[in-house]
Image: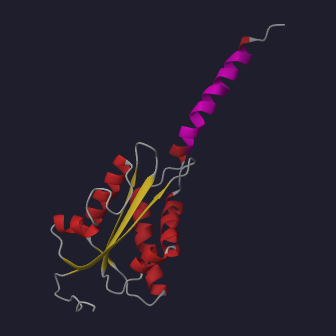
Amino acid sequence: MTLPSTFFRRLALLGALAIALPGLALELFRANTEEAEKYVFDDTNAFRGEHGQRELAVDKTLAATAQRFADYMARTGKYAHDADGRTPGQRLRAAGYDYCMVAENIAFAFDSRGFRTQHLSDKFVDGWKASPGHRKNMLDAEATVTGVAIAQSPLNGYYYAVQMFARPTRYNRCPPAKK
């Protein structure tokens, strides 16, 4: 008994779909990183408000510095606060930014199915809230500004997030050094 050629065409189509679907899933659930950054900013300020801290303002220099670092980690796959050989403070000083204090949260996320935008930002913020060091940065009373960036790696599909916190010296309102 021979099978009709339509059977083989359908079998080939199913095989092609099976191969294409994993990549298609990533495309169907590709987060909008700019929107996710706004969610991180809003959620951070809501969290600060719940704990009696003032809202942070967006600082363009912090955001640009965070973006360069998120892009670097996404491009190279290196992940650490000093992945580029510099500290957060050194990156800010290189951008011409003077500060009284600086702190940084970083994270990465991957899901083979991809992420919806809100889910991606929630993953970062919830992870930072659950981590004592990151939580401390989010609630730091000395911080007055923040910058958030998220980049997706073309190498592996991972999303890298950077949130910087600072108090700029431009207003000469640096608190006295703690002893």
Q: Which residues are magenta?
A: 6-25
Identify the coloring: secondary structure
Instruction: Decide: is 71 above or below 126.
Output: above
Residue 95 visible to the viewer: no
Q: Position of residue 2 (x, y in %)?
A: 80, 7
Q: Note whether 31 is above or below 147 in the view shown.
A: above
Instruction: Tell me the quarter of the image containing the N terminus.
Output: top right
* Residue occupying the far top of the picture: 1
| Left or right of 110 in this view: 179 | left
Residue 52 visible from this viewpoint:
yes
Q: Position of residue 157 (x, y in %)?
A: 46, 46
Say whether residue 21 is magenta.
Answer: yes
Q: Quadrant of the C terminus?
A: bottom left
**In-front residue for pair 129/25:** 129
* Residue at 16 percent of width and 87 percent of height: 172
Q: Residue at x 17, y 75 (%)?
A: 98
- 66 in relation to 77, above or below: below
Q: How many marks?
A: 0
Residue found 78% across the figure and 11% down from its top: 3
44 part of magenta stretch = no
Q: Residue at x 57, y 33 (%)?
A: 20
Most common secondary structure along the magenta stretch: helix
The percent coordinates of residue 40 (x first, y second) are 43, 69
**Residue reaching furthest right?**
1
* Left or right of 86 on screen, residue 38: right
Image coordinates for residue 146, horizontal then vertical, percent: 32, 74
Q: Is residue 158 above or below residue 120?
A: above
Direction front: furthest residue: 179
